Image (cartoon, rainbow, N blue to C red):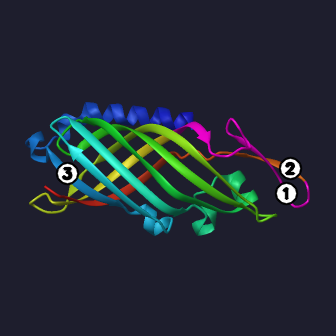
């Protein structure tokens, strides 16, 4: 994951350097605006929901988002970590919430830093036992707003993120990021709390005012 982080930081730097090449007519055209967005990967890939609010000034970008009922075991457990696919039948995030603040490098593009709290519930394959815990993550994000109409009301906003683990809590069995567990055959294994790492998303939104 450190490689992804390095690549992402380099990509953000290149975006800033290249911003004069794709700058809009006037950065203020999208300033002092409140917008509402919904993520598209959450309902289509994870059978969940996500709602986000953003506010832009001339130079700053503020956002808050809340996701719920995210099923990481969909599509053959594709969003789960490899070790977790072997030991757990399901992984659900009842909520994922937090916000971020960043810098607008032109009228539509922004780099920002996010802070997120998630809860995860996992059902162990051999015993059917469930474990739950919460994680705190943070990390950089880069997004670009693509308007769909001349009035600049409706838009897509693709975003690339890298969230790294900061802390795990909410489970008595936690030892740092580790939870020791026992299968039905009395063999033991260790679960490492989930880290989002690098991922992409697309949001659909509109400008409120």
Find numbered disc 3 in the image and state the secondary structure of the residue it sits on.
strand
State the image quarter where residue 151 is shown. Answer: bottom left
Disc ID at residue 34: 3
Please state which of residues 76 and 176 is positioned toward the viewer in this rendering: 176
Viewed as shown, does residue 20 lie left or right of 17? left
The Cα atoms of the two marked residues, 1 and 2, are separated by 6 Å
Viewed as shown, does residue 142 lie left or right of 103? right
| Quadrant showing the N terminus | top right
The Cα atoms of the two marked residues, 2 and 3, are separated by 51 Å
**Mark 1 or mark 2, which has the lower sequence index?**
1
State yes or no: residue 172 in magenta.
yes
Which residue sits at x=49%, y=56%?
Answer: 95
State yes or no: residue 74 in magenta.
no
Span highlighted in magenta in the image: 164-186
Viewed as shown, does residue 55 lie left or right of 73? left
**Mark 2 or mark 3, which has the lower sequence index?**
3
Q: In the rendered image of this protein, does residue 127 appear above or below residue 31?
A: below
The percent position of residue 9, horizontal first and vertical second, equals 42, 32
Q: Which residue is mark 1?
A: 183
Q: Which residue is mark 2?
A: 188
Which residue sits at x=68%, y=35%?
Answer: 176
| Quadrant showing the C terminus | bottom left
């Amino acid at each position: 994951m450190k490689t992804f982080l390095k690549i992402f930081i380099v990509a953000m730097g290149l975006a800033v350097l290249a911003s004069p090449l794709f700058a809009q007519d006037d950065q203020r055209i999208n300033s002092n605006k409140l917008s509402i967005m919904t993520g598209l990967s959450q309902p289509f890939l994870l059978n969940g929901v996500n709602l986000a609010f953003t506010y832009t000034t001339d130079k700053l970008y503020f956002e808050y988002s809340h996701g719920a009922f995210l099923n990481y075991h969909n599509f053959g457990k594709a969003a789960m970590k490899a070790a977790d696919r072997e030991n757990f039948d399901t992984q659900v995030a009842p909520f994922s919430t937090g916000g971020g603040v960043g810098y607008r490098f032109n009228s539509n593009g922004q780099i920002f830093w996010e802070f997120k709290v998630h809860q995860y519930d996992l059902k162990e394959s051999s015993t059917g036992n469930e474990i739950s815990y919460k994680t705190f993550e943070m990390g950089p994000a880069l997004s670009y707003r693509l308007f769909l109409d001349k009035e600049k009301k409706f838009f897509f906003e693709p975003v690339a993120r890298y969230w790294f683990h900061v802390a795990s809590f909410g489970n008595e069995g936690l030892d740092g990021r580790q939870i020791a567990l026992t299968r039905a055959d009395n063999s033991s294994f260790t679960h490492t709390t989930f880290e989002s790492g690098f991922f992409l998303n697309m949001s659909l939104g509109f400008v409120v005012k």
